[in-house]
Image (spheres, rainbow, N blue to C red):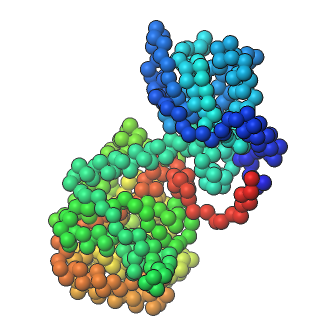
Amino acid sequence: MVLHDDATPTVNEHELRLEKLKKLQEMGIDPWPASPETDATCQQVIEEFKPDQEKSYKVAGRMVTRRSHGKTVFGHIQDRSGRLQFYLKQDLIGDQQFELFNHYFDIGDIIWLQGSSFTTKTGEITLKVEKFQLLSKCLYPLPEKFHGLTDVEARYRQRYLDLISNPDSREKFKKRSTIVRTIRNYLDGHDFMEVETPMLHPIAGGAAARPFVTHHNTYNMDLFLRIAPELYLKRLVIGGFERVYEINRNFRNEGISTKHNPEFTMLEFYQAYSNYHEMMECVEQLLRVVIQKTNGSLEITYGERTIDFGKPFKRIAMKDAVLQYGKLKAQDLTSDNISKVVSQLGFDVGHSYGQNLVILFEKLVEPHLQEPTFIIDFPIEISPLAKRDPQNPDFAARFELYIAGMEVANGFNELNDPFDQAQRFHEQLEHKKKGDVEAHAFDADYVHSLEYALPPTVGCGIGIDRLVMLCTNTTSIKDVILFPTLKKKEVNTDL
C-alpha cells in the first residue's frame, strides 16, 4: 500500500476504488483503453454555443465534480482549456448505462463524452450526454475541492495533484510558458539565433559557483553539470554567430532558499558590436514587452508593493549604493578599512576588496532595491570574464538588475583580450588556493579561442524563474518550477 500525506485518501477509499476496478474488469470493461476520437475542447463547446442551434461534440477530460439527483447526474470535466458541465439522464442513455456510470465512475476518472450542448435553467452551458466511456480509472480521490492541495511539500512532490486541484497553480505555469515564448519572439525578431550548448563541461566555468560533479565511464573523466553556458556561447560569437541566445538549465551545487534552486532556467544572450549601456536599454525594453504581454499592464503587484515598469529603470554604482543604503562613510570603504567594517558588522570577511564590497552590498543594499534598479561599476576582481571600464580600470563595464530585492539580470562587456583573460584566470586560481570554492577555473581552451578574435561583445543572463516569480506575484521559487529539487523521500509503491 502506498504511504500518503494529507493530500491522499484513507486505505478504505482506495480499496473501494480497487473493488470497482475489479468489477469493471469482470464486466469486460477495459479501465485503460486506447483513446477514441475527440473533436472539441471544453472551452470550444462553450464558445461555439448558440441557443437556436443544437450541435454534437465528442470531448474528453478528467471528471472533477459530480452530483446525483435520482435519475440524473450533473458534473464537470476538465481538460487543458477549462471546465465543462455535463448532464446524464437515465431516460436518455438507458438504465444499464446509467447504473454503470452512477456506481462505477468516480471523481478523478478520465472519461470520454459524446452529446449535444444546451443551457440549464441557471444559464450554464452544458453537454447532454448520449454516450460515454471510461478512459483511465483514478484509484484515489482528488484533494478536497474547496481547498485543493494545501500541504506545501505535497504540492511539490505531487505536482500533478496540485495542477488538477489548484487553478492558480495551473495559471502560473501557463503564464511561465507565455513568458518564455514572448522572450523567444522578441529575440527572434531582433535577429538573434537560438542555439544549444553542452550541459556537461570538462571545466566548470562561466560563473562563480560550486558545480555538480559527475563521471564519464568510457572516457574515464570527471565532468561538471554546467553552471553557465557563457564560454560556449562566446565561442559561437567568435565563429561568426554575432547574435545568439540560449534558454536552458543551469546547475549550481549551492544552498536552497525561496530564491534559489540547484537546477534553474536561464536566458543568456550575446550581441557583437554593442556595449553594456545598450544592453541595459535592451533588457529594459525586453522586460516591458514581457510584463505587458503576460499581465496586460506595465504595472505589477508583488507582495504589498506595486512595481511600475513604465518608468525608466534607476542606475546606481555599487559603491554609492552601499554608502546610501548602508549609511556608511566614504572612508569606511577604503581598501585599508573595508575588511574591518565587514567584520564589525558581523559578516564573514572576503578574500579581496571586491568581495568585501559585494558582501556589504548583498547584506545592506539588496533588500532595499524594490523598483527596477541597475547596479553598475562592479569591482574588477569579482568580474573575471568582464571587460574593464576604460574610464576606471579597477571596475568592470558591468551591470546587475535588481527588482523586488532579487537579482534578475547580469550583463557586461565581454573580455576579449586573451592576455588579460589569462591573467584573470590566474588570479582566480589564487583565490581558490585561499579557500574560495566558487573561484573560476583556468580554461586554457577558452583563452585559446580568444586568440582567434572575439569582436567587441556584450552579454546578459536573465533568471527565468525569478522573472516568473515577479510576473505571478510569487515569493517562493519552488512555486514556479514544476518539479523543484527536494530531499529524497522513501515511498513504498506497491499497489
Q: Position of residue 42 (x, y in %)?
A: 51, 28
| Identity of the residue drawn at 22% across and 61% down | 243
Q: Is residue 85 above or below residue 350?
A: above
Q: How many marks?
A: 0
Q: Is residue 382 above or below residue 148?
A: below
In the displayed structure image, the side of residue 234 where residue 200 appears, left or right: right
Toward the viewer: 93 or 191?
93
Q: Is residue 261 visible?
A: yes
Toward the viewer: 264 or 12?
12
Q: Position of residue 451 (x, y in %)?
A: 19, 82
| Identity of the residue drawn at 48% across and 12% down | 54
Q: Position of residue 471 (x, y in %)?
A: 44, 47
In the displayed structure image, the side of residue 93 where residue 176 appears, left or right: left
Toward the viewer: 481 or 370?
481
| Identity of the residue drawn at 22% across and 80% down | 450
Residue 61 picture quarter: top right
Quadrant into which the N terminus falls? bottom right
Toward the viewer: 172 or 98?
98
| Identity of the residue drawn at 26% across and 83% down | 447
Q: Is residue 209 visible?
A: no
Q: Is residue 181 above or below residue 70?
A: below
In the displayed structure image, the side of residue 223 where residue 108 appears, left or right: right
Looking at the image, which residue sits at the far top? 52
In the displayed structure image, the side of residue 398 where residue 27 appears, left or right: right
Q: Position of residue 81 (x, y in %)?
A: 49, 34
Q: Is residue 106 above or below residue 4?
A: above
